[in-house]
Amino acid sequence: MEESNYQDIIKSIYNRIKEEGNPGETAKYISELAKVDGNKFGVGLKLLNGQQFGEGDYQEKFSIQSISKVLILALAYRTLGEEIWKRVDVEPSGNPFNSLYQLEADKGIPRNPFINAGALVVCDVLIDLSDNPKKYFLDFLKEVSGIKDIDFSYDIAKSELETAFRNTALTNFIKALGNIKNSPDEVLDLYCHICSIEMTCEEVCETFSFLANQGANSSNNKVIISPSQTKRINAIMQTCGFYDESGEFTFRVGLPGKSGVGGGIVAVMPKQYVVTVWSPKLNPKGNSYRGMKFLEDFTTATENSIF
Amino acid sequence: MEESNYQDIIKSIYNRIKEEGNPGETAKYISELAKVDGNKFGVGLKLLNGQQFGEGDYQEKFSIQSISKVLILALAYRTLGEEIWKRVDVEPSGNPFNSLYQLEADKGIPRNPFINAGALVVCDVLIDLSDNPKKYFLDFLKEVSGIKDIDFSYDIAKSELETAFRNTALTNFIKALGNIKNSPDEVLDLYCHICSIEMTCEEVCETFSFLANQGANSSNNKVIISPSQTKRINAIMQTCGFYDESGEFTFRVGLPGKSGVGGGIVAVMPKQYVVTVWSPKLNPKGNSYRGMKFLEDFTTATENSIF
Amino acid sequence: MEESNYQDIIKSIYNRIKEEGNPGETAKYISELAKVDGNKFGVGLKLLNGQQFGEGDYQEKFSIQSISKVLILALAYRTLGEEIWKRVDVEPSGNPFNSLYQLEADKGIPRNPFINAGALVVCDVLIDLSDNPKKYFLDFLKEVSGIKDIDFSYDIAKSELETAFRNTALTNFIKALGNIKNSPDEVLDLYCHICSIEMTCEEVCETFSFLANQGANSSNNKVIISPSQTKRINAIMQTCGFYDESGEFTFRVGLPGKSGVGGGIVAVMPKQYVVTVWSPKLNPKGNSYRGMKFLEDFTTATENSIF
Amino acid sequence: MEESNYQDIIKSIYNRIKEEGNPGETAKYISELAKVDGNKFGVGLKLLNGQQFGEGDYQEKFSIQSISKVLILALAYRTLGEEIWKRVDVEPSGNPFNSLYQLEADKGIPRNPFINAGALVVCDVLIDLSDNPKKYFLDFLKEVSGIKDIDFSYDIAKSELETAFRNTALTNFIKALGNIKNSPDEVLDLYCHICSIEMTCEEVCETFSFLANQGANSSNNKVIISPSQTKRINAIMQTCGFYDESGEFTFRVGLPGKSGVGGGIVAVMPKQYVVTVWSPKLNPKGNSYRGMKFLEDFTTATENSIF
């Protein structure tokens, strides 16, 4: 496809969707997220050749939430290597994202690193890997994204910690099952901070471009993770990136991706591009309503999916 | 990659694996399958440009079993269109392949068309679509594969029907939940016949090449299903093709594929090729031990996966 | 309590309940049961001293359905002894009465003999114990009840067999799990016949009086089962007699008992009496609405429960 | 039965069991309990006429653990009345005692007050009912038992709190589901203290005699709860007192009772007596091995159960 056409396609789909209804609800359980304007809508696209495109609120920061789970996995995988898969599996869960039942059946090994249970275990791993895991993660984020002043959103983290009863339950339950080594409180604190990161669509594209680029930073070509590790993280995004709507996303969009309850979705076309959509209203399964719609139309219009 | 290299890569991986151990068990519950020599091992590859490669027992027929589930889905999807998704979902199951529990929770809508429950519902659809569903399926098979004399293996179908207590349970259970319209006995009979098809690795590659070729027969370019339908079937293979090892296959191999308890696995590299492996000994999750291994090594050696 | 008062108490409670609403639905899934007048209401009481009381439609026959499960258990237990507990457990299920999930987890051993799965296994035992299990059961029924002309209701059995998809699923599933020895069709046929028995409240009291009388027929004192066996059957009725409302029945009524979807409930006060209520409209958990209510008020008014 | 015979029966069964093996393990997860001598064995019996019998270590204090759950239920039920059943159900769970899955399905309403989830909710109720719930419970304990100097075992409570990951998970999970009003930490603290009570077999009999005596203290006849409330608590002990071995206990022993992981079991014969056994080694379901055995033999020898 002519690169000059990308902006036209994005604009056209964006405008059509913007005129349609915007059903769904913004996430209510975190007070800071509940305040966000539900009609915000932004799209960013970054090609590996460096070209960038954007539409709508693509330069406004939003809470990336679970999108961070991909980044902590990349960091832990880079350092720990294949050992990480002893602590967390790579299977889709087929169940709502907080299911304690499945965890009980699986003896504390979370189904995959992108359900909450799995990300909590990855946080536990990071605590073992560093004396200052928060700084360790921020340094990685800077390395990957090239953004120098990135920091946690302490208000969002605090707001999340205060009502994190379900995640507290999960963490203590995994601890009881033997797959968390550190104190549940420390794990939860790291988890809530990691989820609190705010970025623009443009910045998310920049940050995730190493996953389109076989593991190397697309700006300076420094290797972050190996091509094989990159393939595997993309594979897990493909099968597990959207909770119990992962099959649906693969079916409709056909790209590996990851969503967050802040309404962001990032998707990766290996060797070609990263695309990020932000629209805070969520469908009943907890994924951005307009985000899902935009990406389906986008891969249909570009006739370009991994399948 | 140079096409001339494919044969070398296949031969090299094939020989290495053949020298290693071959743990696992052949499927025992169907007496006809239990008789098969567990050390049979064949690999076939067909490029879209028409070139074909093979190694070992790649010209020997084996029972393709659940691999047929992709073909009945393609047939039903072609005829019924998107209506088919009201009868069966597209989510990975995250549970062992015969789970009745999940079906109960999902009110009779099977998680996807590649678990037994889903394929039984697709059989029910075929019975509604044709007065002679067995002939209807064989005709489709001939159209897709170009094989003129293909027929059911009536001995295997009979052997399977005699001990099909679990599938009888499944069918009656879905009937009770309202998602099977015809008589359970008729559905089971069709299902067992469809699973009884025997093909060589070479023939499976031929049969599945329309899924690599955006829906068109790769020999004569006649359209079988649309590019969009092709993408969707490949997507479902990616997330659901290996029961509760689907994530693992995606993670290790990185291609959409489908396995059968006869020890066959077919995998599709969109726009490039179809590869089929047959080795009857199964790992604990019911997928061919050597088949999984070969394909992982093959996509690693060719540095070529969808991710 | 003065025995002369029983009739007054029964009459008073009966009349009060009759004037109140009668919510709920008659069982619809068996066409023969769906035809029954939902406002039928009868109560029978038999003291061990031989006195009998009745009110309303207590001399009208109704389909006792699952109440038969207690009788086949008594017959199988008498013949097989403690061996029976290798085939079926004695724990309450805590789940809806047809749960296939629990059966899967318990490897084919039903939780107790009063859920459908358990009664199907008991039927399988009866087939092993007799060349003519239907006659074997009818003979036992005559011995226990003293009713000479008792027979199956062949219309109800046929009506039930025609739509027994869920029970067919259950039977085949247990067969697949190895805990049914005979052909699923034979087991289902016996099960549906056993459930088809029709009796009046008066006759049910007569039939069950051996369970109040330490195992001996209360008319002729012939031993049917031992006191220890009697205690155990009563204990299982106490914990498992009302599907997932067993705790509620124990809590409200405080007597061992058993219900059927025909709207009958029998309850036993050991060493004192048997009481039977029939009212076809069922509460959401499948137990007679007025039956539950009558028995709660009856044990409250007589200040007489096992607790 | 002649009362003079009770001592003979107890002594004879006690001695026989003492000579047999004592398989099983003492509870290991609480360090204070793990220190207890596994061969301790005591039996106490109190008749409502005031006679008391004992054998072995019946005057040695042991940690009554979950036996306390009956006492907090009695206290909360007395104060709150039938409202309590909006917060906790009365059905047997049919699942291992800490199942989070069932709680998820039941939307935060625990199956019954004798599983951990249920007792945690009852603790939450006590916190609402009193400014000083610990003193409130100790005062009730003194009223019921007549023991003046009773207090918590602060070491056991502390030991339990330190490793209460599973109960922390449960409490936070119920909080997330909306059925805990106070802070999870406060609820857990009360729960662990309540479970830490230590008593002798003799004292447990004294404490529970109101449940044999229709709700009145058997020493001074002061009403603690009503006869109807007593019947209901006994009924719940019958169906739910032994986790997923409740059916087995009812089947073998035939009395309402409650066990604790300290190895104690109390059982109530309404209108006649309370019997308590203590033996720390537990069977695989978490109930005292010798306690279960003693009580089965005792009700068999006295030919006296509620059935």
Image: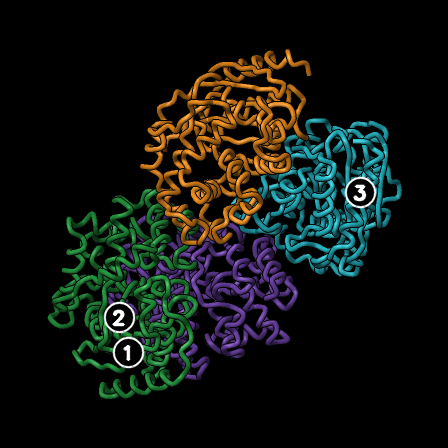
Chain colours: A cyan, B orange, C green, D purple
Mark 2, secondary structure of its residue: strand
Q: Nearer the viewer, residue D165 or A288?
A: A288
- Rounded to the nearest angstrom, the CA distance separating label 3 from label 1 is 73 Å
Residues behind callouts 3 and 2 on a single chain: no
Horizontal relation, residue D147 to residue C145: left or right: right
Q: Which residue is mark 1?
A: C42
Q: How many marks?
A: 3
Residue D55: x and y in percent read: 34, 63
Horizontal relation, residue D75 to residue B175: left or right: right
Q: Which mark is nearer the camera, 1 or 2?
A: 2
Mark 1, secondary structure of its residue: strand
Question: With respect to residue A212, does C196 lie above or below?
Answer: below
Question: With respect to residue B53, does B204 lie above or below?
Answer: below
Residues behind callouts 3 and 1 on a single chain: no
Q: Where, by quadrant of the figure, is residue A236 drawn? A: top right
Q: Residues within 10 Å of mark 1 (few under 14, many from 20)?
A: many
Give the residue at x 18% y 81%. C51
- Rounded to the nearest angstrom, the CA distance separating label 1 from label 2 is 10 Å
Q: Amino acid at mark 1?
A: Gly
The subunit carrying tag 1 is: C
Q: Which residue is mark 2?
A: C62
Do callouts 1 and 2 mark residues in contact (Cβ within 8 Å)? Answer: yes
Q: Which residue is mark 3?
A: A10
Q: Amino acid at mark 2?
A: Phe
Q: Which mark is nearer the camera, 3 or 1?
A: 3
Residue A263: x and y in percent read: 74, 51
Q: Amino acid at mark 3?
A: Ile
